[in-house]
Amino acid sequence: MPKMKTHRGAAKRFSKTGTGKLKINRANRRHLLESKSPGSKRSKRRGVLMASGDVKRVSQLLVYMK
């Protein structure tokens, strides 16, 4: 049986915390920021933990993520 491969697109987008939970970055903070409110931009600075329903699927893509 060949080795399993990590999905490289997923590896660039998700990271694991020290306790093993998956962390993602919030969307809508790349460009066109003038029209967005300061509170909206500020709240998107921090990452957010992934919803529990998505964790199983993403962890199949990230087979070797520690």
Image (tube, rainbow, N blue to C red):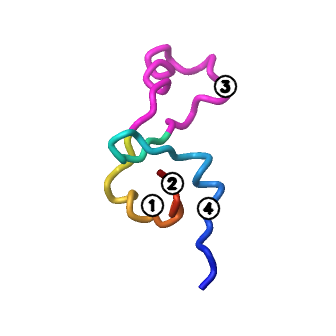
Quadrant (top left, top right, bottom left, bottom right) of the N terminus: bottom right
Q: Nearer the viewer, mark 1 or mark 3?
A: 1
Q: Is the residue 45 above or below the residue 4 in the image?
A: above
Name the residue beneath numbered marker 1.
Answer: 59
Q: Position of residue 17 (x, y in %)?
A: 40, 40
**Residue matched to label 2:** 65
Mark 3 or 4, nearer chain start: 4
Residue placed at 44% from the left, 45% from the top? 16
**Which amino acid, by three-letter code, is at mark 3?**
Leu
State the extent of the magenta-drawn residues as a range: 25-48
Query: Above or below — where is 37 with respect to 53?
Result: above
The numbered mark at residue 7 is 4
- Quadrant assignment, res 43: top left
Q: Name the residue under label 3.
A: 32
Front residue of this view, candidates 3 and 57: 3
In whole angstroms, how far apart are the C-alphas of marks 2 and 3? Answer: 33 Å
Mark-to-mark CA distance, 3 and 4: 30 Å
Q: What element carries label 4?
A: loop
Do the numbered discs 1 and 2 sit on residues whose CB atoms are within 8 Å? yes
Mark 1 vs mark 2: in front: 2
Mark closer to the chain start, 1 or 3: 3
* Numbered tag placed on residue 11 in the rendering: none
Three-letter amino acid code at disc 1?
Answer: Ser
Q: What element carries label 1?
A: helix
Query: Mark 2 or mark 3: which comes first in sequence?
Result: 3
Q: Is mark 2 on a helix, strand or loop?
A: loop
The residue positioned 59% from the left and 19% from the top of the image is: 35
Query: Tag 2 or tag 4, which sits nearer the N-term?
Result: 4
Q: Which amino acid does label 2 sit on?
A: Met
